[in-house]
Image (cartoon, rainbow, N blue to C red):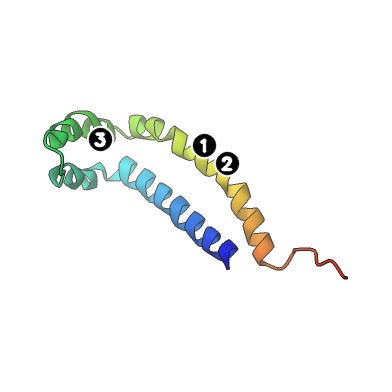
Amino acid sequence: MFSLLRVLFAVAYLGGTFIHLYNGARQPQVYRAFGDTALVPGFKRVWSGLFMPAAGRGRDFLINRLPNLLLAAVQLPLLGMELRTLGGCREVSET
């Protein structure tokens, strides 16, 4: 059961990464709302001044997401191992 939850979490995490990459490259304006709903005073100004200009340039946004892509690349083989384990490829020792 724990392995299944780990696989579901991994799929959701990786899916979210790819959705953010797509939105950042194609529709950066969707992130403007995050700055508008900031709880910390001054964060809206930081968000608008630092993040939004970078999100508007697809190349820069993708370069800034390089660590996420590398993390996803490391996690994909681990996800494959979990899926094989759930699929019943586990060796069963006879006693």
Determine whether 65 is above or below 15 in the image. above
The residue under label 3 is: 56
Q: Position of residue 49 (x, y in %)?
A: 17, 29
The residue under label 1 is: 70
Dot 2: element: helix
Q: Residues within 10 Å of mark 3 (few under 14, many from 20)?
A: some
Dot 3: element: helix
Q: Amino acid at mark 1?
A: Leu
* Image quadrant containing the N terminus: bottom right
Determine whether 86 is above or below 47 in the image. below
Q: Position of residue 43 (x, y in %)?
A: 16, 35
- Depth check, front residue: 40 or 84: 40
Q: Residues within 10 Å of mark 1 (few under 14, many from 20)?
A: few
Mark nearest the camera among 1 and 3 is 1
Q: Amino acid at mark 3?
A: Gly
Q: Residue at coordinates 68% horizontally, 67% vertically from top-left?
A: 87
